[in-house]
């Protein structure tokens, strides 16, 4: 399972580079500074969580995988929803995508909270 999570983190990071370059070069001239900043926020969160997934893949190889895998899926889904909704908001101009963004943020928060909780609270069979 850690291999799949590592691949997911790698793919997110790779596309983060592509989206970052797209924003810096293709969109810079056509967007307001506010919209460009919104796009950059999506890229930044995507890259942070791509790196987080890479680290989580390592953690899963170190600790029992069943403890952390759900957190990895929350982080992946949260990143897609959070960053993806910002990208769509900027690229389409459809402001309602901004209403979806907080759901991605909640998934990201829940994912990191689950990482912490799963590493602090022992599984009964491990006690």
Image: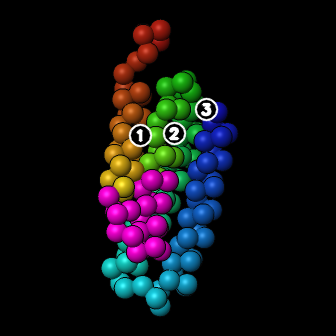
CA distance separating discs 2 and 3: 16 Å
What numbered label is drawn on residue 111? 1
Task: Name the secondary structure under disc 1.
Answer: helix
Please tell me which of labels 3 and 1 falls first in the chain: 3
Mark 3 surroundings: few (<14), some (14-19) or many (≥20) residues within 10 A: few
Q: Nearer the viewer, residue 88 or 50?
A: 88
Examine the structure image and report whether residue 68 is included in the region drawn in magenta. Answer: no
Task: Name the secondary structure under disc 2.
Answer: helix
Find disc 2 in the rendering and name its residue: 73
Q: Is residue 111 left or right of residue 80?
A: left
x and y, in percent, of residue 127 in the image: 42, 10
CA distance separating discs 2 and 1: 8 Å
Magenta-tinted stretch:
80-99
Q: Evaluate if marks 2 and 1 touch, with contact meaning CB atoms under 8 Å apart.
A: yes
Mark 2 surroundings: few (<14), some (14-19) or many (≥20) residues within 10 A: some
- Residue at (49, 46) in percent of width and height: 77
Q: Is residue 21 above or below residue 55?
A: below
Find disc 3 in the rendering and name its residue: 61
Image quadrant in which you'd find residue 12? bottom right
Asked if residue 112 shows in the view, the reply is: no
- Residue at (34, 46) in percent of width and height: 106
CA distance separating discs 3 and 1: 18 Å
Q: Is residue 67 left or right of residue 13?
A: left
In the image, which is nearer the foreground, mark 3 or mark 1? 1
């Amino acid at each position: 399972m850690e291999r799949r999570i590592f691949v997911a983190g790698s793919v997110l990071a790779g596309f983060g580079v592509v989206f970052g370059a797209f924003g810096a070069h293709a969109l810079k001239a056509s967007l307001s500074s506010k919209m460009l900043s919104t796009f950059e926020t999506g890229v930044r969160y995507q890259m942070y969580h791509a790196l987080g997934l890479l680290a989580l893949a390592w953690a899963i190889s170190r600790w029992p995988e069943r403890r952390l895998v759900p957190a990895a899926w929350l982080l992946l889904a949260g990143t897609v929803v959070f960053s993806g909704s910002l990208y769509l908001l900027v690229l389409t101009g459809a402001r309602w995508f901004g209403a979806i963004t907080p759901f991605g943020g909640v998934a990201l928060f829940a994912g990191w909270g689950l990482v912490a909780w799963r590493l602090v609270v022992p599984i009964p069979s491990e006690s």
